[in-house]
Image (tube, rainbow, N blue to C red):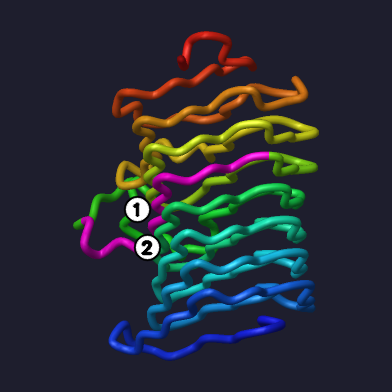
Amino acid sequence: RGAAIQFDSPGLWNKSTIVSCEFDSNRSRGNGGAVSVSGGWIEIADSTFDGNEAIKGGAVYFEGGQGELVDCEIRWNNAWVGGGVALFGETAVDLSGCLIHSNVADMGGGVHSGNEIVVPECAPRRGRSCPRSSLPEQYCTMRDCMVRYNVAYISGGGFYLTEGEHFLFNSTIEMNISYSDSTALFIEDMRGYDWRETRLHAMTICNNGPVYGRNIEGEYVDEGANCISLSGACGEMCE
């Protein structure tokens, strides 16, 4: 599955660390061009992912397990979904201090998060209610990152976010391109699933294009200190 490393170690007490590595020009016929994670907990720090390819997650793919990407550069990777990083299933991943640039995908040029979470019968859209603790979870947190120059041929030049909780803090999404809509950030309509939210705080989102769609498509929670231009350039508004 992962062309370079496949990590599948059930139980979050099974922890691994990858530090100061270079993943260059790996290819996968499945998911995760360089690293594929399906269980356990993994930290990847101070590493570079350059020119990797896969079906999902050109550089890194999670489907289960948890992890962190810290101070990594993820560039020139290619996939159908999630040109740089793809998160599927029940997982929790923190992106911190990363530069995610020049990746290409149909959906989620930089990062794709969500999808393939099994929704229980008690989900609100099915006319029932259930305790939050019984619901499937996926978390994607991004802080202090730069997401730029990524390309999506369909949607979500920078990010494509669907089922899950997503927290984007103190980061910049700029100079991304989508040839359909949502040049910076696509957020799937999750109304009716009241436990699903995308939250933005201290984000700068602007200068994405060309103008095939707005910078952001979908609903999000504005937690303040954001500089977001929905239609294009920031101008002086973020200075």
Q: Is residue 37 above or below residue 71?
A: below
Quarter of the image that includes the N terminus: bottom right
Q: Residue at x 70, y 23 (%)?
A: 213
Q: Quadrant of residue 193?
A: top left
Secondary structure at numbered mark 2? loop
**Where is residue 13 shown, x and y percent of the image?**
28, 87
The front one of 186 and 6 is 6
Q: Residue at x 30, y 24 (%)?
A: 224
**Where is residue 188 shown, x and y percent of the image?**
53, 40
Q: Residue at x 56, y 35 (%)?
A: 173
Q: In the shown orientation, is residue 198 left or right of residue 81?
A: left
**Where is residue 168 shown, x and y percent of the image?**
41, 42
**Mark number, residue 88:** none
Q: Residues within 10 Å of mark 1 (few under 14, many from 20)?
A: some
Q: Is residue 167 above or below residue 177?
A: below
**Where is residue 124 shown, x and y percent of the image?**
33, 46
Q: Quadrant of residue 74?
A: bottom right
**Mark number, residue 120:** 2
The region drawn magenta spans 132-148
Q: Quadrant of residue 57?
A: bottom right
Q: Is residue 4 above or below residue 145?
A: below
Outermost residue to the top: 236
Kindly identify which residue carries mark 1.
123
